[in-house]
């Protein structure tokens, strides 16, 4: 039996050639902005948001499960990630290195790195190859 998760916001992506659409679950507005960025990278932008909880409905300004236009939501501006340098780093095996600051997108909100200690950011930068080890 699988797990069940409740997310505040669900983003519905555009349909691809097979007629299927991706769903982008988000817990906050930063994740919503990152989901839009990810969707635009693959060429299937998010076409609508819907709230799964009361908090999500408050953010969107619509009742729960009512679709909302993407343009109707004010999302934060994303900047290059200070920990990974805004690029997907790869290790010696060609595997992408996951960055906890930007969730692997290379973009995050300004000041989000302040949730980590300096030594943690420095370790992430070394791992990403931004500073000498």
Image (tube, grey):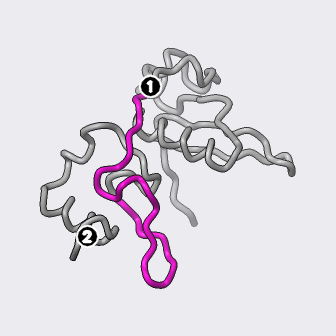
Residue 20's disc is none
* Span highlighted in magenta in the image: 75-99
Is the magenta region chiefly helix, strand or loop? loop
> Seen in the image, is 87 located left or right of residue 21?
left
Q: Position of residue 84 (x, y in %)?
A: 34, 59
Q: Position of residue 125 (x, y in %)?
A: 27, 64
The quarter of the rendered structure image containing the C terminus is bottom left
Query: Dot 1 corresponds to which residue?
Result: 54
* Along the line of sight, the residue nearer the viewer: 32 or 61: 32
Query: Is 84 within the magenta?
Result: yes
- The quarter of the picture where residue 103 lies is bottom left
Q: Position of residue 104 (x, y in %)?
A: 44, 57
Residue 126's disc is 2
Question: Which residue sits furthest front?
Answer: 132
Residue at image point 53% right, 29% down: 51
Query: Is 118 within the magenta?
Result: no
Residue at image point 42% right, 78% down: 91
């Amino acid at each position: 039996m699988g797990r069940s998760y409740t997310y505040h916001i669900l983003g519905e992506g555009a349909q691809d050639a097979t007629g299927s659409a991706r769903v982008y679950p988000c817990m906050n507005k930063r994740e919503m902005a990152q989901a839009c960025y990810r969707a635009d990278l693959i060429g299937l932008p998010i076409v609508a948001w819907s709230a799964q909880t009361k908090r999500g409905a408050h953010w969107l300004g619509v009742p729960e499960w009512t679709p909302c236009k993407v343009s109707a939501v004010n999302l934060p501006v994303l900047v290059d990630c200070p920990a990974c340098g805004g690029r997907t780093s790869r290790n010696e095996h060609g595997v992408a290195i996951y960055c906890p600051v930007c969730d692997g997108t290379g973009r995050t909100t300004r000041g989000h790195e302040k949730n980590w200690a300096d030594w943690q950011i420095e370790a992430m930068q070394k791992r990403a190859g931004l500073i000498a080890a």
